[in-house]
Image (tube, rainbow, N blue to C red):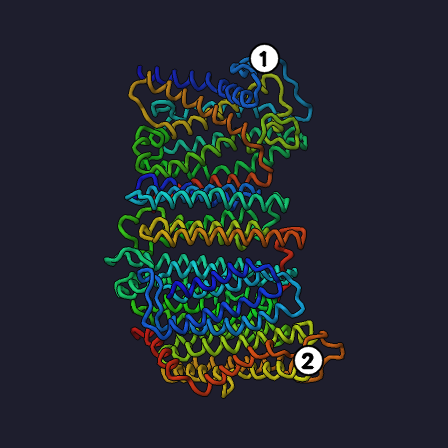
């Protein structure tokens, strides 16, 4: 009974919160710029609007183009079920599930890129190439961070790695965890196409990475893409929040609000970073990703010395 | 060793990588300045008794390394009207990776040297070796004269880190002397850079290759 | 007394800064130098001096170097004053101030028994010399100054690292980490050996950069080539030996701690390498002053080699400091005269110096014979002592290589200098107005005379001083 209730809250939160995060980021950026900005609930209205529209599909595309958004959404959805949220349990949990997590997201990325290539447009091909390159560089950082957590908790299950024992590890091996946290925050920005990797608000196709891949989608398909991206942001954000605030108060009434609060803080942090930094030159992006890898790497070295 | 010492040293280590990977000279100056300020604060966590001498040293270090020298370098930079490093001998990615390798080796090497009990398991020796290595890299692979000066500053930061933390009994006079020497050195270097700029119209050291054999 | 030794040049520097007349300013330098030398004479004869609680001590090693630097500076300052006045309307305020400042800082280095203070002095001498190298404000001298400044500063920073290692080597002793030479020597056997070795290597590399040991010597030829002659003379004659003194201090500690064998091996290898580099780059060298610079590299190698061989060679090396310094001064000042007369340093433009500048040419030739180790000059005696000690202590390979390299140097240097000195002067008229004057030749004559004296007869006080100093460095075998 407990678990069903718990799982239900998990699923509801995971499905309902992500668009709010997007709205919060936009609001933070607007406030920084001195504007009032759109409402925090704007993404919800956007999704509703998109669902009601019709789709236009180019005649050059095949089933891959139609499958892209669907796979992206489904993989993100399953990924959300893998991560432990507030009280360190997840609906789906088994040994080695973090590998599944990484590759579910990889699968979604693969199909998005394939859909982009399927259109035959040079812009989208360019965006796909960039996105995939950066993903290659970001993956080692993610896994190195996971390695640190695995070494600390002694288990290969996400529920244990990000579980309640993490709080005690912070006081003992705080330095490694700080490095992993920094590294994962950079990965969060990279995987979700935020500044300094990609500007979500740019109008120039030659400067886009992620937006240009989804340029040709419309209507419900575009809504799926948007929602899938929000879910992906939620996944990475949840990882960061669990790492940064690993305490479990014991009572669900305490844990869930803390978690939601943490997610909102992360969203505001992303908004702040986007407001104070400019996008990096394309040739400098790999340097930042390698730096993230190095941070995680040093997290491990500090652990084993 | 105070608990707070290690995280600060990690930030100093991270700043090494920032200096190696960033191409904007202003950014590198800021990173080195920040590291200097960190260095200045570190004695507060090491010395058991915070006498007047320690406080004065902290103040002078922060003032010189964190403000005076960077301010002077920014002034020199503005005069030379350049913003970025030209293509260095080893590209930025290579510098980052070399720096990482050097840091790793430094961590390994610090195990072969016997340390006093209060210093084992501390990050002081690896951090200082890593900073020295990063300074060396910058000195040898960068082509802009100001970047070479910044490499020298980084080198001095690393050495100072070692001295500051391990030698609680280093005489005050010597530490002040070292700082003053550093300041004067950078000052003279800045003047020479100004002359280089006036003479060649650019501060890239590719022009300084005439004397050979 | 010791403080006065350091302060007199400083005060003189301040005075020089204040003097507005360009013509008369340089003449303050010989005056200040004379004052400094008088003080040195008193210090040498008086009781052992200790000041600042053991930070400044005049020990036998220091006495040799101090007397030597003071004499050298006096000789150079007379030449410099005349040189600056000769048709050079350049403002020489900074030059004079920095020149005197470098004397003050060199005294500080020689006197300090606190290694940290010694380091501060070393760095100060580097900075003091830099503006003087840039005196002519040409692009090439700018490049030379930049290289000099950067390479020497980095080298000295590495030496500081080494000094910190040295201080940390006291971690297992009852001593608090200290850089006081006397304390370190006293507790030497208890020092931690890994740290001691690392410290010695770093100090050798670091101060070796300042000393001009290969492969860290790359700044030397450029700086010597582009700097004015008296600056090159002081650099080669006095500053490089000061760096050598710094290495000797740390070697003293290592020796006392029982790491003597380790240090010696490194020094022999490095010494031979420097000699080889000097020899290689001297052959076919077309620039007179760069030739002399590589000769400096070679002789610094000889110094380090001598200490590395040990035994009587240490006496030989210390004697060689004096011989080399005086000869280098003579050579560089002659080269300066030649450059002023012919307007160029290149062997393509200069020839027949013996006819164009009779006194300078002859002295230059004599200097060449002296520096390459011909009897009856001083360097022959010191080099002979070193070789003797090498062969006597069964280090045959080292001794043989030493002799071979000396021979190569003789040939290489001779092939450049002989054409410069002999032959016919070029048709193009020499710079009008430059003839051998009294004040531009007397200093050279005096230094060469001293070298000749040292080759024939070493005054007993000097000999006993040298033996005392050598004994200091031979604490254990």
Counting from the top left corner in percent of width and height, residue C436 is at 64, 79
Q: Is residue C122 above or below residue A292?
A: below
Label 2 marks which chain's residue?
Answer: C
Quadrant location, the N terminus of chain A: top left
Query: Quadrant location of residue C130?
Result: bottom right
Q: Residue at x 71, y 81 (%)?
A: C425
Q: Residues within 10 Å of mark 1 (few under 14, many from 20)?
A: few
Q: For numbered disc 2, what is the local secondary structure?
A: loop
Q: In this view, does C121 lie above or below B202?
A: below
In space, the residues marked 2 and 1 are separated at their CA atoms by 94 Å
Counting from the top left corner in percent of width and height, residue A15 is at 46, 18
Q: Residue at x 57, y 26 (%)?
A: A68
Q: Which of the pair B125/B66 is nearer the observer?
A: B66
Q: Which of the pair A257/A146 is nearer the observer?
A: A257
- Residue B150 visible to an observer of this rendering: yes
Q: Residue furthest right?
A: C427
Q: For numbered disc 1, what is the local secondary structure?
A: helix
Q: Which of the pair C108/C273 is nearer the observer?
A: C108
Which numbered mark, 2 or 1, is in the foreground of this view? 2
Q: Residue at x 54, y 27 (%)?
A: A275
Counting from the top left corner in percent of width and height, residue B129 is at 41, 52
Label 1 marks which chain's residue?
Answer: A
Q: In this view, does C356 lie above or below A253?
A: below
Q: Name the residue under label 2.
A: C351
Q: Name the residue under label 1.
A: A49
- Residue B137 visible to an observer of this rendering: no
User: Left or right of C427: which side holds C277?
Assistant: left
Counting from the top left corner in percent of width and height, residue B213 is at 61, 68
The disc label shown at residue C455, or none: none
């Amino acid at each position: 009974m407990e678990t069903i209730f718990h799982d239900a809250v998990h699923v509801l939160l995971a499905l309902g919160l992500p668009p709010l995060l997007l709205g919060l980021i936009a609001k933070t950026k607007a406030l920084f710029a001195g504007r009032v900005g759109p409402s925090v609930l704007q993404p919800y209205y956007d999704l509703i609007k998109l669902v009601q529209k019709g789709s236009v599909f180019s005649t050059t595309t095949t089933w891959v183009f139609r499958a892209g958004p669907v796979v992206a959404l489904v993989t993100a959805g399953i990924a959300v079920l893998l991560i432990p949220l507030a009280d360190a349990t997840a609906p789906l949990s088994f040994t080695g599930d973090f590998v599944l997590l990484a590759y579910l997201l990889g699968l979604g990325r693969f199909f998005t890129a394939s859909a982009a290539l399927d259109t035959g447009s040079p812009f989208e091909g360019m965006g796909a190439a960039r996105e995939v390159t950066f993903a290659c560089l970001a993956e080692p950082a993610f896994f190195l961070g996971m390695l640190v957590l695995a070494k600390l908790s002694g288990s290969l299950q996400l529920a244990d790695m990000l579980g309640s024992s993490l709080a005690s590890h912070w006081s003992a091996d705080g330095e490694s965890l700080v490095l992993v946290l920094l590294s994962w925050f950079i990965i969060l920005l990279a995987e979700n196409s935020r500044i300094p990797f990609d500007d979500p608000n740019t109008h120039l196709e030659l400067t886009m990475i992620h937006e240009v891949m989804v340029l040709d989608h419309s209507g419900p398909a575009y809504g799926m893409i948007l929602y899938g991206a929000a879910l992906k942001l939620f996944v990475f954000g949840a990882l960061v929040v669990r790492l940064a605030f690993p305490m479990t108060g014991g009572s669900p009434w305490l844990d869930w609000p803390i978690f939601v609060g943490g997610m909102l803080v992360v969203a505001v942090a992303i908004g702040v970073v986007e407001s104070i930094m400019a996008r990096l030159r394309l040739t400098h992006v790999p340097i930042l990703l390698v730096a993230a890898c190095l941070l995680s790497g040093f997290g491990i070295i500090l652990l084993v010395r | 060793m105070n608990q707070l010492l290690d995280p600060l040293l990690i930030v100093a280590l991270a700043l090494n990588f920032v200096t190696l990977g960033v191409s904007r000279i202003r950014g590198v100056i800021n990173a080195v300045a920040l590291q200097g300020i960190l260095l200045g604060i570190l004695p507060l966590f090491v010395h058991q008794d915070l006498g007047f001498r320690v406080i004065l040293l902290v103040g002078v270090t922060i003032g010189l390394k964190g403000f005076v020298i960077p301010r002077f370098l920014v002034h020199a930079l503005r005069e030379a009207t350049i913003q970025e490093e030209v293509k260095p001998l080893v590209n930025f990615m290579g510098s980052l990776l070399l720096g990482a390798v050097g840091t790793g080796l430094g961590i390994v090497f610090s195990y072969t040297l016997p340390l006093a009990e209060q210093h084992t398991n501390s990050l002081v020796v690896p951090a200082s070796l890593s900073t020295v290595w990063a300074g060396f890299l910058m000195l040898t692979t960068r082509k802009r004269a100001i970047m070479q000066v910044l490499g020298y500053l980084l080198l001095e930061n690393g050495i100072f880190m070692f001295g500051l933390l391990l030698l609680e009994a280093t005489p005050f006079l010597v530490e002040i002397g070292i700082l003053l020497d550093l300041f004067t050195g950078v000052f003279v270097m800045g003047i020479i850079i100004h002359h280089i700029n006036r003479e060649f119209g650019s501060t890239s050291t590719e022009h300084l290759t005439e004397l050979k054999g | 007394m010791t403080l006065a030794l350091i302060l007199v040049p400083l005060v003189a520097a301040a005075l020089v800064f204040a003097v507005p007349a360009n013509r008369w300013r340089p003449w303050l330098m010989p005056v200040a130098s004379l004052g400094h030398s008088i003080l040195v004479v008193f210090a040498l004869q008086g009781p052992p001096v200790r000041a600042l609680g053991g930070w400044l001590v005049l020990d036998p090693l220091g006495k040799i170097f101090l007397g030597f630097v003071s004499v050298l500076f006096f000789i150079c300052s007379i030449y410099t004053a005349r040189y600056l006045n000769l048709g050079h309307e350049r403002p020489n305020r900074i030059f004079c101030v920095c020149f005197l400042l470098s004397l003050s800082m060199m005294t500080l280095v020689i006197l300090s028994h606190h290694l940290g203070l010694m380091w501060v002095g070393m760095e100060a001498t580097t900075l003091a010399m830099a503006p003087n190298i840039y005196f002519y404000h040409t692009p090439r001298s700018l490049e030379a100054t930049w290289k000099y400044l950067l390479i020497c500063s980095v080298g000295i920073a590495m030496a500081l690292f080494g000094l910190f290692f040295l201080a940390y080597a006291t971690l297992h002793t009852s001593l608090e980490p200290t850089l006081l030479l006397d304390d370190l020597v006293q507790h030497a056997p208890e020092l931690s050996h890994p740290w001691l070795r690392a410290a010695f290597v770093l100090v050798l590399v670091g101060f070796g950069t300042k000393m001009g040991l290969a492969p860290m010597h790359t700044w030397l030829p450029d700086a010597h080539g582009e700097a004015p002659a008296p600056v090159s003379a002081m650099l080669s004659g006095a500053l490089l030996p000061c760096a050598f003194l710094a290495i000797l201090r740390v070697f003293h500690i290592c020796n006392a701690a029982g790491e003597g064998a380790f240090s010696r091996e490194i020094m022999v290898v490095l010494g031979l390498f420097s000699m080889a580099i000097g020899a290689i780059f001297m052959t076919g060298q077309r620039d007179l002053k760069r030739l002399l610079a590589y000769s400096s590299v070679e002789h610094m190698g000889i110094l380090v080699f001598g200490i590395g061989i040990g035994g009587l060679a240490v006496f030989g090396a210390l004697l060689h400091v004096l011989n080399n310094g005086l000869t280098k001064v003579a050579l560089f000042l002659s080269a300066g005269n030649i450059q002023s007369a012919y307007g160029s340093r290149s062997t393509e433009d200069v020839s027949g110096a013996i006819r164009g500048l009779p006194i300078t040419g002859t002295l230059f030739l004599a200097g060449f014979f002296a520096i390459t180790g011909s009897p009856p000059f001083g360097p022959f005696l010191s080099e002979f002592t070193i070789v003797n000690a090498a062969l006597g202590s069964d280090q045959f390979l080292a001794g043989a290589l030493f002799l071979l390299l000396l021979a190569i140097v003789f040939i290489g240097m001779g092939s450049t200098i002989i054409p410069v000195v002999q032959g016919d002067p070029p048709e193009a008229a020499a710079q009008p107005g430059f003839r051998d004057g009294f004040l531009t030749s007397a200093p050279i004559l005096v230094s060469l005379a001293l070298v000749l004296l040292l080759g024939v007869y070493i005054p007993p006080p000097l000999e006993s001083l040298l033996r005392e100093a050598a004994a200091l460095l031979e604490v254990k075998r």
